[in-house]
Amino acid sequence: MFVHIPKTAGTSFRDALDSHLKMVYDYSQGNPVTSKDVSKYIYQQDNFYDFNKRISSFKNVCIAGHFPVYKYLNLVNPSRIITFLRHPVDQVISHYNHQVKYHNLSCTFEKFISIPKNANLQSRMLYRIPLGLIGFIGITEQYDCSLKLFNDIYNMELKSLRSNVNDKKIMQKEKLGSELFNEILNKNADDLKLYQSAIALLKTRSEFNKNTDPKRWVFSHVQLNKKGNITGCAFTCGEEDKAVKLELLVNGGISHQFEAKDFFSEIPKARLPRGRYVGFKIANKHLSSDSEITIRVVETQQILFSDKLFTKR
C-alpha cells in the first residue's frame, strides 16, 4: 500500500511502481485516476469486505492514492505500507503552487497557510500508526537514496523518474521572508517532528542494510505508560513466524532477555503478523530510577528503544 502524500514526489514513485505491480488507485470519489474497483466497492457500495476479496484475487497488487493510512490499514501488513515525506516548508509551498496551477486556487499564499486543512497534512495522513511500524518511509529530498534503499528492501528494480513537476511556480522558497518561513514551521510543527524522525530512521535503516539482510529489520513500537511499565510490539518483515527475541539493558548491562510474543491489543485495525502475538511488557520492578534503559534485538543488536535519563513514573 502506497500512501501518496501530496507533493512529496509521490507521482514519480507511483509511476515507477506502476511498471512492476498491479496498481489499484484511490484518489477520491470522482477522480478520473481512481480505479473502477475502488469507485464501485468503496464509493458506491461502501463495501470494504468485497473490495478486499476483489483485490486479493490479484497478484502483486498495490493500493495507492491520496488517502489516510487508516482507511486501508486492516488490508495489509504494516511492513508493506510505503510513503514519502518532505520538509513541511517545501511541501506546503509545492502544494500551494499545484493548487493554483491545476485547481484554479485564487487565494494568497498567506491565506492558504492559515487554513487548518493545509497544515500538518503529512502527519494527519499517517495518523494512528507509529512511524516504527511503517514498512518504508522515503524522503523526498533524498529521493534517489530512498529509492535505492526501497529496491534493496523489497528486491525490486524501480527506476528514478520525475513526474508531475511544476515548472511554473507562483511561490518560491527563496522568496520567503524569515517571518513567513517560521510561520509555516509553527503551523506545521507536527509535520516537522515527523519529518525529522523519518530522516533519522532512513539513516539508521540505510546503515543497517549495509551489513545485514533487510528482512532481519525489526519493526517496533515501544512506549512508557503511566504506570512506569514499558509496553510495545516487535516483528520482522520476513516470512518467518518466529517471535522476535529482545533484551533489556540497564546502564549498559544486560538485565534479561525476552520475546515479543504477547497479544498486542493496541492499534486494533492494524493487520499485525503472528495473529497479533507480537507484544511485550516490562514491569517497572525491572527498572530502577534514573537509569539508562535500552531495548534491542538479540540477533542483530538493532536498538528499538532508549531512554537515557529514565525515571519511574
Image (cartoon, grey):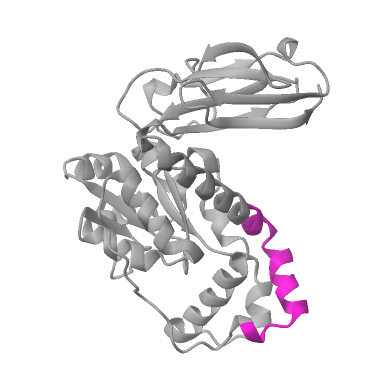
Task: Give the magenta part as a residue range.
Answer: 174-193
Which quarter of the figure has residue 270? top left
| Magenta span includes 108 | no
Where is residue 81 drawn, in percent x and y?
39, 45
Question: Who's the residue at 56% across and 61% down the image?
Answer: 121
Q: Nearer the viewer, residue 122 or 208?
A: 208
Q: Nearer the viewer, residue 153 or 84?
A: 153
Q: Say above or below: 174 vs 35.
A: below
Q: Is residue 78 visible?
A: no
310 lies left or right of 83: right
Where is residue 195 drawn, in percent x and y?
59, 56
Q: Is residue 160 visible?
A: yes
Q: Nearer the viewer, residue 236 or 73?
A: 236
Q: Nearer the viewer, residue 119 or 200?
A: 200
Where is residue 162 drawn, in percent x and y?
35, 73
Where is residue 96 drawn, in percent x and y?
55, 78
| Magenta span includes 180 | yes
Residue at the extreme front: 211
Q: Say above or below: 217 vs 181.
A: above
Question: Who's the residue at 22% across and 39% down the image?
Answer: 53
Q: Say above or below: 25 vs 91.
A: above
Q: Main secondary structure of the magenta part?
A: helix
Question: Who's the residue at 47% across and 69% down the image?
Answer: 7
1 lies left or right of 228: left
Indicate the quadrant containing the C terminus: top left, top right, bottom left or bottom right.
top right
51 lies left or right of 108: left
